[in-house]
Image (cartoon, rainbow, N blue to C red):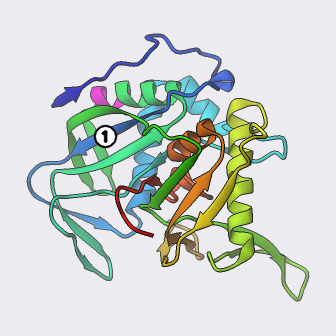
Amino acid sequence: MKEKELEFKDSAPSRDHGTDREGARMRLQIELGEERDYRLPWHYPYLIYSAILQVIAQADPAYSQFLHEKGFSSPDGKSFKAFSFSPLHSLTPPKTDSKGLELEGPLHFILASPSEVFLQAFTSGLIRQGGLTIGQSYLPLQGLELLPSPKVGTSLQFKALSGVVVSTGELDEAGKLLKRYLAPTEPRYATNLLENLKRKYMAFYGRALPEEPKLSLHLFRGFRSKLYRIPGKNQGIRGWLLRGELQGPPEVLVFALDVGLGENTSLGCGFIEPLKGERQ
């Protein structure tokens, strides 16, 4: 297995998981699988989410319990797990059908988090485990590289590699509250997305965003719908592949790169990366 620059700033992370607030601001690039084809169902992001939590549980049971029972909680009572990950990538385009996709190994994806405790636990657990089991496929670990989060100023042009999910609650005719997934063409999409980011920042750091520069979002034209399936649930999760520009305090923009944008980021939604020379 290839290991490159796997060094964290502290060898012994704090055991007070609720105070893991300062942020590692790093990403892990993970290479998995042998040189053969792997068959995966369309809901494989949920399987990766489950595999990540299984690695954490084996490596650091106390932190795993913290994520499961509490997580990082905001004053309104909502909590999140403070990580995001990209879709799986291979050197060749995937073959797809109605049941899933076939990818040629080795495969790679990026895992990001502002929590150093999380990154250390996952790294040590993955190396000890030697690979990930995604559904029915075991993918041996081939390489693990620690990447610094991209440096940004007060503006970040980004591209979503997985669908950015934003929802709202609405009452039906019987007065029952239902969840409705918003589209980027609706004004509340950008508003709710920014509120979600502010809430996550406050939950993780325990403080409000800096007042200046003001946080804002501009979405570029052209976006595509993406539906995510969760085993055992009838309703899918509707997200959007899009590009845009975030403006605001640099630490908040880096935080967005680490935790993703929108809802369900720990399930594989809302992973973003900086735009590289692409036109609006």
Q: Position of residue 146 (x, y in %)?
A: 33, 31
Which quadrant holds residue 202? Answer: top right
Quadrant holding the N terminus: top left
Q: Residue at x 78, y 41 (%)?
A: 74
Q: Amino acid at mark 1?
A: Gln
Q: Which residue is at the far left?
A: 35
Q: Is residue 70 visible?
A: no
Q: Position of residue 164 (x, y in %)?
A: 55, 64
Q: Residue at x 55, y 45 (%)?
A: 259
Horizontal relation, residue 187 to residue 240: left or right: right
Of residues 217 and 72, which is closer to you in this image?
217
Q: Main secondary structure of the magenta part?
A: helix
Q: Which residue is at the far right?
A: 175
Residue where numbered disc 1 is placed: 29
Pointer 1: residues within 10 angstroms few (<14), some, or many (20+)? some
Number of marks in picture: 1
Q: Is residue 128 magenta?
A: yes
Please tell me whether residue 101 is drawn above or below residue 261 in the rendered image: below
Q: Is residue 214 magenta?
A: no
Q: Position of residue 185 (x, y in %)?
A: 64, 80
